[in-house]
Amino acid sequence: MPVLLLVIGIAFGALLGVLWERSRRLAVSSEAMDHSADRLLALAGAQFDAAGRPINESLSRLDDRLRELERGRAASQAALAQQIDDVRDAAGALGTQTAALVTALRRPEVRGQWGEMHLRRAVELAGMVDRCDFQTQTVLPGSAAATGGEGLLRPDLVVRLAGDKYVVVDAKTPLAAYLDAAEATDETERQQFLVSHAKHLRTHVDQLASKAYWRALGASGRPTPEFVVLFVPGEAFLSQAVDIDAELLEYAAARRVVVATPTTLIALLRTVAYAWTQDTLAANAREVFELGRELYGRLNTMSGHFDRVGRGLNSAVAAYNQSVGSLETRVLVTARRLNELGLVDEELTVPAQVEVQTRALAD
């Protein structure tokens, strides 16, 4: 036991020695590391102090740029807010004006004036103002006789065709049901209004067909094709009606009514304008032909006058030459004797004969 305790004490002492030596080495290493860290911090501080000024300048420029961007963003945001306010105000004003326009278009007299305005605009765009008679509230001559005295006909427009023919255009604006459909929020209700809109347009076709404008024009001595143009002042008005009533156009054509929107009416009027151009060219050609014949006759008469003048000039030249010959042989011979006798000093001047003859006109 004592020996065992001794051995354990020696081993414990050796262990303590080893631990102390290791702790001493760790302390030395820690001091070395602390010294190195101090040197590293000192070196980093020196480097940072050397580079601190450029970094500060860069940071200052960056801060100025950020402030400038912030000011620009604030100005843009303010301008955008102002534009949004302007758009909101404009939308409000447009909504008010639209509501006022819709209210006005619900009145039949306003719808009629609006349709006539679009009709006149279409005529102007087609370049046919000088070939169209706007006869609003104007009674067609002979309309009472043509309708059996049942009523007078007042078309909105009479288009004069080449060849002294005419086409009647009546403007209709079926908007009441269409506007109701545009304001409807329920799809079923909207479809019901569109069905009414199509029926209204078909009713206008029937009313216009019953007037038979071509008969009134024929009775007044102004022949016209046997159809009338129903002008609808909006593409959407007709397309919505045709979507509901697919046979509307065929129904109108069977009753001699041609339904036209601004686009088709302009095309029709431009075709009429082309016919007028061709008619004008033909009339001008006929006039040129007549003028040519008249000019030819006048040139022939003038040639006869020139011929007589030439013959008169030739006769005058012959008489002149004969007179010069007579003067030379009968008068000047005796007169020269005076010069020979010394009574005069100057020589007599003898007129020259004319040798040029007039040129005859070629046949």
Image (cartoon, rainbow, N blue to C red):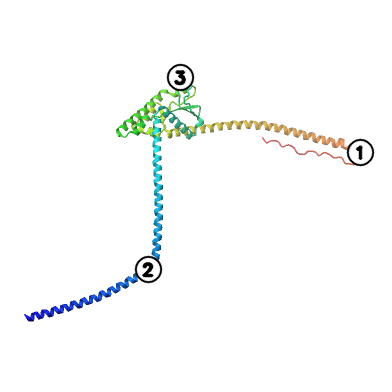
Q: Position of residue 89 (x, y in %)?
A: 40, 40
Residue under the image location 27 percent in, 75 percent down:
32
Q: Position of residue 187 (x, y in %)?
A: 30, 34
Q: What residue type is labelled 1?
A: Leu
How many numbered discs sit on the rendered protein?
A: 3
Q: Where is residue 110 in the image (x, y as percent from the top left)?
A: 42, 29
Q: What residue type is labelled 3?
A: Ala
Nearer the observer, disc 2 or disc 3?
A: 2
Q: Residue furthest left?
A: 1
Q: Which amino acid does label 2 sit on?
A: Asp
Residue under the image location 38 percent in, 66 percent down:
52
Is residue 230 visible from the viewing direction of this image? Answer: no
Q: Name the residue under label 1.
A: 338
Which disc, if any, is residue 144?
A: 3
Q: Quadrant of residue 254?
A: top left
Q: Is there a contact, CB below 8 Å, between mark 2 and mark 3?
A: no
Which disc, if any, is residue 281?
A: none
**Quarter in which the N terminus is drawn:** bottom left
Q: Quadrant of residue 324?
A: top right
Nearer the observer, disc 1 or disc 3?
A: 3
Nearer the observer, disc 2 or disc 1?
A: 2
Residue under the image location 66 percent in, 32 percent down:
300
Q: Mark 2 points at which residue?
A: 49
